[in-house]
């Protein structure tokens, strides 16, 4: 399901501190290094709150499916922003299932359970450059996704973005087939961030996906067995399942949120609401309310 400088590209919903980081910096001399540790009640990736699959309710979290964590989860990260505009950062999160087990099930169809054994940890490493031309800003970046306890899940994603004042538009394109996406998938976001009275910060993110319908792990062909799926089914990582066919694009989410720091303690409280869209198979997701408590430094 993821700021005028670096952004945790996966965490469109989950790490509420990302919403705080999206705010225009008010300090005259912001520190080059910042960090955060967060506790969130769920980790929902880019609006996928119910299933990544082609039918609802789908496999559910027990079967290595959305959301990334249906339980409270710890997240963390750090960023460096140079005065010249170059930036680099890291974002991490625990996940409530094993991407390794899911990836292994593509190669070995006898794997039908144990998806919550040896749970994965997501690690996002990103960097790039943010510049300004008059009142406009632009961002060029690259994100690497690395999963501890993962298989067929690591990938690179490009990021291109433009901004004007509190508004921004970003495009993030996946460069490899993975169990969670196809090469060429592009995640589009339109964002807005502002400061409200009483030191509240408000953010909104409108998300849309354009999809490549066919990939190694998601599409209409069982690429491991070399066979086409039957009519009325689609290939989802480890088999052809009854349900919707792939779509070329879909509205993913509208996320609105507020955050507020508690004095100078570094503690930040956050609340977000998800108005859901559809996944890559056109399956409607569920709305959610998310909360977090973060320590920033």
Image (cartoon, grey):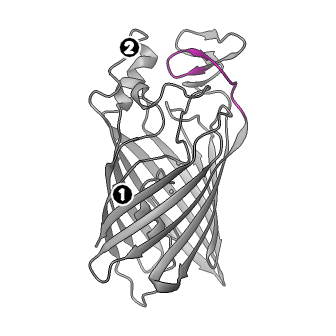
Residue that appears at 45% across and 71% down:
259
Q: Judge left or right: residue 202 versus residue 263.
A: right
Looking at the rendering, which quadrant does residue 171 occupy? bottom right
Q: Which residues are magenta?
A: 235-247
Q: Judge left or right: residue 100 versus residue 227.
A: left
Q: Quadrant of the C terminus?
A: bottom left
Q: In whole angstroms, how far apart are the C-alphas of marks 1 and 2? A: 32 Å
| Residue 245 within the segment the image draws in magenta | yes
Place of residue 105 in the rendered image (x, y in percent of width and height, measured from the top left): 42, 18
Residue that appears at 68% across and 24% down:
244
Residue that appears at 47% across and 85% down:
198
Q: Residues within 10 Å of mark 2 (few under 14, many from 20)?
A: some
Dot 1 falls on a residue whose secondary structure is: strand
Q: Which residue is mark 1?
A: 90
Residue that appears at 47% across and 50% down:
10
Circle on res. 111? 2
Which badge, 1 or 2, comes first in the chain's sequence? 1
Place of residue 97 in the rendered image (x, y in percent of width and height, measured from the top left): 35, 33
Place of residue 256 in the rendered image (x, y in percent of width and height, measured from the top left): 57, 63
Camera-side residue: 115 or 32?
A: 115
């Amino acid at each position: 399901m993821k700021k005028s400088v670096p952004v945790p590209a996966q965490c469109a919903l989950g790490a509420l501190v990302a919403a705080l980081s999206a705010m225009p910096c008010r300090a005259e001399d912001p520190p080059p290094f910042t960090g955060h540790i967060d506790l969130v009640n769920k980790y929902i990736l880019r609006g996928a709150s119910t299933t990544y699959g082609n039918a609802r309710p789908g496999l559910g979290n027990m079967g290595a499916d959305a959301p990334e964590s249906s339980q409270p989860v710890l997240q963390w990260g750090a960023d460096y922003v140079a005065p010249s505009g170059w930036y680099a950062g890291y974002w991490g999160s625990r996940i409530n299932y094993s991407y390794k087990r899911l990836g292994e099930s593509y190669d070995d169809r006898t794997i039908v359970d144990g998806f919550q054994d040896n749970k994965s940890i997501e690690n996002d490493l990103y960097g790039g450059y943010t510049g300004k031309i008059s009142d406009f800003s632009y961002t060029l970046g690259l994100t690497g996704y690395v999963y501890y306890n993962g298989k067929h899940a690591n990938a690179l994603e490009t990021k291109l973005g433009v901004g004007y004042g509190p508004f921004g538009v970003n495009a993030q394109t996946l460069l490899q087939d993975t169990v969670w996406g196809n090469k060429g998938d592009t995640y589009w976001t339109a964002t807005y961030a502002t400061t409200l009275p009483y030191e509240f910060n408000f953010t909104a993110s409108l998300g849309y996906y354009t999809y490549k319908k066919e990939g190694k792990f998601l599409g209409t062909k069982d690429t491991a067995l070399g066979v086409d799926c039957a009519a009325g089914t689609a290939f989802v990582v480890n088999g052809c399942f009854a349900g919707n066919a792939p779509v070329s694009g879909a509205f993913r989410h509208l996320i609105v949120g507020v955050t507020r720091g508690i004095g100078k303690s570094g503690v930040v409280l956050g609340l977000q609401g998800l108005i859901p869209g559809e996944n890559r198979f056109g399956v409607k997701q569920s709305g959610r309310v998310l909360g977090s408590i973060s320590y920033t430094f």
